[in-house]
Image (cartoon, helix red, strand yellow):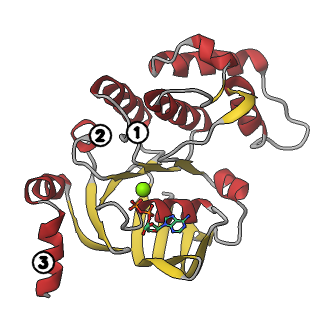
Amino acid sequence: MSAIEIKDLHVNIGDKPIVKGLSLTINQGEVHAIMGPNGTGKSTLSKAIAGHPDYTITSGDVLIDGVSILDKEPDERARAGLFLAFQYPSEIPGVTIANFLRAALQARLGEGEEIDASGYYKQLYAEMDALKIDRKFTSRAVNDGFSGGEKKRCEILQMAMLKPKFALMDETDSGLDIDALRIVSEGVNHLRGPNLGILLITHYQRLLNYIVPDYVHVMYDGRIVKSGDKSLALELEAKGYDWVKKELAAV
Ligand code: ADP
Ligand code: MG
């Protein structure tokens, strides 16, 4: 079985420590949720793992199937099976969704191999239908002028097409109204299975009513301070993040 292991990870932005010794292992097939207040380093964690150049890993390691990915470029990390769904997806004017996804899939193939165009469109339309994305969107530029909900559905569409082993989903619920939340969650639940490990980052418990995690972790000040099952999310919702702060202060 495949696993992603985050080992005592420390991440700086400039010279400011943000992630301060975080360890977590996700096996393929598992859904882990990280919950935490704003500013606690959740996005920093996911971007550092994906290889964003603004985030400096000062110590610790991230391994996929026992091999460190930290010396790999972001595209190599993607080929190793990693996918990041952004909290704030970028707009890519001039590049259509169809061409973008095709290029991303093509980049995975060996030299001389070509994507089968008819098979590609068949798969693309099937995934778009499942996510209730209008087929007209294939010829629109990636995220260009999309609503918040459309951007998040586009992220899930990328995930559906690229079929990663591990997906880091950073506040996929932010900016979604209740209908879009349901559609996006259905999309994720549809992709959920023995070949996919998911790290679901969220500020609110609400998302976890739709995508029920196997494990819940509370992140505070750059570390995981509490772990449990899905009931921890409900406890957190009821008691608020102050509860965790008070518990920590008491130790
Ligand atoms: P979260 O996703 O949990 O809300 P972030 O990882 O976005 O937290 O941010 C953690 C801390 O890092 C915050 O104090 C934030 O202000 C700071 N930070 C995030 N991005 C940058 C950046 N590009 N430059 C400087 N500081 C940043
Ligand atoms: Mg964030």
Residue at 53%, 19% (x, y): give it: 128
Q: Is residue 227 above or below residue 237?
A: below
Task: Count how many numbered circles sit on residues in the image.
Answer: 3
* Kind of residue indicated by mark 3: Glu
- Estimate how packed mark 1 is, as few (under 14), some (14 to 19) or many (20 or more) residues with alpha carbons within 10 Å: some
Name the residue nearer the viewer: 16 or 191. Answer: 16
Can you give x and y, in whole percent of width and height, for residue 143 in the image? Answer: 60, 31
Upstream in sequence: badge 2 or badge 3:
2
> To which quarter of the image does residue 138 belong?
top right
Mark 2 Cβ inside 8 Å of ligand 2: no
Question: According to the image, label 1 marks what residue?
Answer: 192
Cα gap from disc 2 to disc 1, whole angstroms: 9 Å
Residue 179, image x, y percentages? 31, 23
Closer mark to the observer between disc 2 and disc 1: 2
Return the residue nearer the eye: 62 or 243.
Answer: 243
Q: Foreground mark, 1 or 3?
A: 3
Work out which residue is located at the far front of the displayed protein and give it: 145
Q: For mark 3, what is the residue?
A: 247
In this image, 93 relative to 42: left or right? right
Task: Give the CA separation, mark 1 to mark 3.
Answer: 34 Å
Q: Secondary structure at mark 1?
A: loop
Q: Earlier in the sequence, mark 2 or mark 1?
A: 1
Which residue type carries mark 1? Arg
Q: Quadrant of residue 117?
A: top right
Q: Which residue is mark 2?
A: 211
Graded by Cα atoms within 10 Å as few (under 14), some (14 to 19) or many (20 or more), the crowding at tag 2 reads some
Residue at position x 36%, y 40% from top?
173
Q: Are marks 2 and 1 in contact (CB under 8 Å)?
A: yes
Question: Horizontally, is 111 left or right of 32 in the view?
Answer: right
